[in-house]
Image (spheres, rainbow, N blue to C red):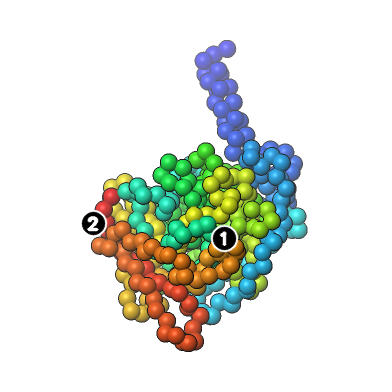
Amino acid sequence: MSTEIIMAVIMNLLLLLLSAALVRSGPSMLPLKSFKISGNVTYDCIDIYNQPGLDHPLLKNHTIQMKSSISRSEFKNPTDNDKTYKKKIRCPDGTVPILRNSKDYITNPQYFHPLSQNRPEAHIAGVRSNNGPFRGIEAWFNGYALNISTDEASYSEIYIGSGSDKEVNFISAGFMINPSIFGDGRVWTYGFWHGKDGKGCYNTVCPGFVQVSHEVPLVEPFDLKPGVPVWLRCSIYQDKQTENWWLTFLSKPNVDIGYWPKELFNLINNGANVVGVGGVVQASPSGSSPPMGTGKFPTGDRRASAMFTNIEALNSNYEQRKISSFHMEKLLDSPNCYGLRIGTVKPFHRTLLGYFFNYGGPGGNSCGV
């Protein structure tokens, strides 16, 4: 047998092994229906009991929780002129929408979480409380189109977690612009988790997240005009009965997207020590930091810059409280490039804002690394 034939056989075997590692085989994983949203975005409707999230070894005996045991209040977005969710997908009953992952999406580098005290390549502007244990966090916030380079990323997120630089359990969700993942500069919804043994990933790249909604996927792109935001009110909270960590989009009606099972974690099974919200950016290796929020510093005009409002946390007894009722820490590590302005609302003033803050900035080369 010639050397060329041997090499061809080896390459074919390697390709087969790689395919087996990335895609589950068998009739149960064949999509019942598919939706192509744009050139690089396709969702497959996969049997809910055979979705890739359940392939995690810790979920071998996991029973899917179809509905959260906690009822959340519905919320109507009062900003009628801004872009909001419009359902583009309706998978058949018994199936869930799973984003068809690309090679670049699977191999994207690690996420930098705000619990870390050593994050030289990331900057943050927001608030958090470490007065846990907490059972959840929610906020209403917006995302804007920004010019982000392929080796940079910009996020607007809510998060919960426990741990330190050595070991951490962490969950975040919100909006992100990350061209190295999706191959474009659009605003996307996302979820991220980091659990036992340092395992974790974005969205459904690796097993772990259990999708439940058959209409609203965990990750979805938005085509935004400059200066026109998309709004989202979402909540990460621990289920009373199962201790799973649910992600719900609070709207009218509310949508339980899915959850991260308790089996994935070892530090947040009795609640999380830290909750927080804000903007986070990842700088390029060259040291240049991307814009955050609207790309402008916050001013006195609350609608002129990115915003987080109606920020509330669930305490250890599942009582919902404004985050300002806990000991709160303001986070702003690069005031040369980003700003943080805490809002004030006069007593008895009729507003839906509640506790809020504006944040963001242009970034640049003088933000520190």
Sort mark 1 into few (<14), some (14-19) or many (20+) by Cα contacts within 10 Å. Answer: some
Residue under numbered circle 2: 366
Residue closest to the eye, 275 or 133: 133
Q: Residue at x 35, y 52 (%)?
A: 122
Q: Which mark is residue 295?
A: none
Residue closest to the eye, 278 or 85: 278
> Element under label 1?
loop
Residue closest to the eye, 265 or 139: 265
Q: Residue at x 56, y 18 (%)?
A: 5
Mark found first going from the N terminus, 1 or 2: 1
- The spot of residue 232 in percent (x, y) is 53, 68
> Element under label 2?
loop
* Quarter of the image that includes the N terminus: top right
- C-alpha distance separating marks 1 and 2: 41 Å
Single out the mark in the foreground, 1 or 2: 1
- The spot of residue 326 in percent (x, y) is 46, 66
Q: Residue at x 66, y 72 (%)?
A: 253
- Does residue 110 appear anywhere in the picture? yes
In the rendered view, tell whether residue 286 sits above or below residue 10.
below
- The amino acid at mark 2 is Ser
Residue under numbered circle 1: 316
- The spot of residue 271 in percent (x, y) is 56, 54
In the rendered view, tell whether residue 27 sits above or below residue 312.
above
Sort mark 2 into few (<14), some (14-19) or many (20+) by Cα contacts within 10 Å. Answer: few
- The spot of residue 8 in percent (x, y) is 55, 23
Q: Residue at x 46, y 60 (%)?
A: 131
- The amino acid at mark 1 is Ser
